Image (cartoon, rainbow, N blue to C red):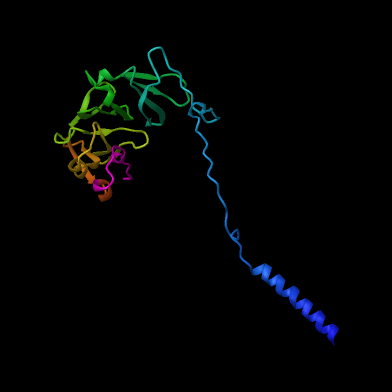
Amino acid sequence: MQKRTGHLITWLCILANCLNVKCKQTDADGLITSKYVYLRPHYDKVQMFGTSDTLHFYLNDSAYNDIESMNYFQQGTTEYLSFFDKRSASINIYQPDSRYIKYKLPITKFIKKPKLSNTSVYMKNFDTIVIADKYNIYVFDSSGIAKVTIPFKAKQSAVKSKLEASRPPVFIDQKMYTIVKPSGMINSVTECLDWKSLYEFDLKNKKATLHYNLPKVYQTDLRSFQYLYSSYCL
């Protein structure tokens, strides 16, 4: 009887010890220890490599790679890529299946004295070439005839339209919508309160209208040049 009692006590002690080990929590249970290691970036070693779907385009003797704006468009069933080269002050047009310039349109064909530092171009097709500079937005055809000229809002001289491939203009009926970009510094509270993020151009009545103030947090608490850029979905 004493022997059985001794064995029973032994097994109970072993079981209690196992339960104690199993249920005991330690500082490491369920925790993943992380360690911050600073790696200095080497921006000079960043490289780009062409892949099988990379498009290559040749520049001629009067074309450069100072691209201010670009976009894809179609004329009928033919596809084109348009690049506004700031250095040569020209619109260079390629076909994706060709590596050579198909058409070259000097910007002075449309605007006699363009302010190239503030100029961007968007080609909807050869009949609708949209050009924005510091003061106006224009719609030309490829012959250089101005179909529409609309000045930007006079009371907001630092506000201009920007034509970008990532945020291209949207055409709805007889109206065109673009993003708004500052052409100067916007620092005062009043300017931030008055800032609008979308330009509407009525191509029929030749009228410009600004829409949509910034959210409250960007009007009062977070004021910065970078917050004035916007995107849209129409």
Whole-percent x, y for residue 76 in the image: 37, 31
Q: Residue furthest bottom?
A: 1
* Residue plotted at (37% across, 26% down): 82
* Residue plotted at (41% across, 31% down): 77
* Residue plotted at (23% across, 40% down): 200
176 lies left or right of 1 = left
Whole-percent x, y for residue 169 in the image: 30, 36
State the residue in front, 128 or 179: 179
Confirm whether the magenta stretch covers residue 225: yes
Q: Is residue 183 above or below residue 200?
A: above
Confirm whether the magenta stretch covers residue 55: no
Q: Which residue lies furthest to the left in this view?
A: 155
Q: Is residue 82 above or below residue 31?
A: above
Whole-percent x, y for residue 53 in the image: 52, 31
Give the magenta range.
219-234
State the residue in front, 180 or 206: 180
Q: Count how many numbered circles sit on residues in the image.
A: 0
204 lies left or right of 10 = left
Residue 228 appears in which quarter of the rendering?
top left
1 lies left or right of 134 = right
State the residue in front, 54 or 218: 218
Q: Main secondary structure of the magenta part?
A: loop
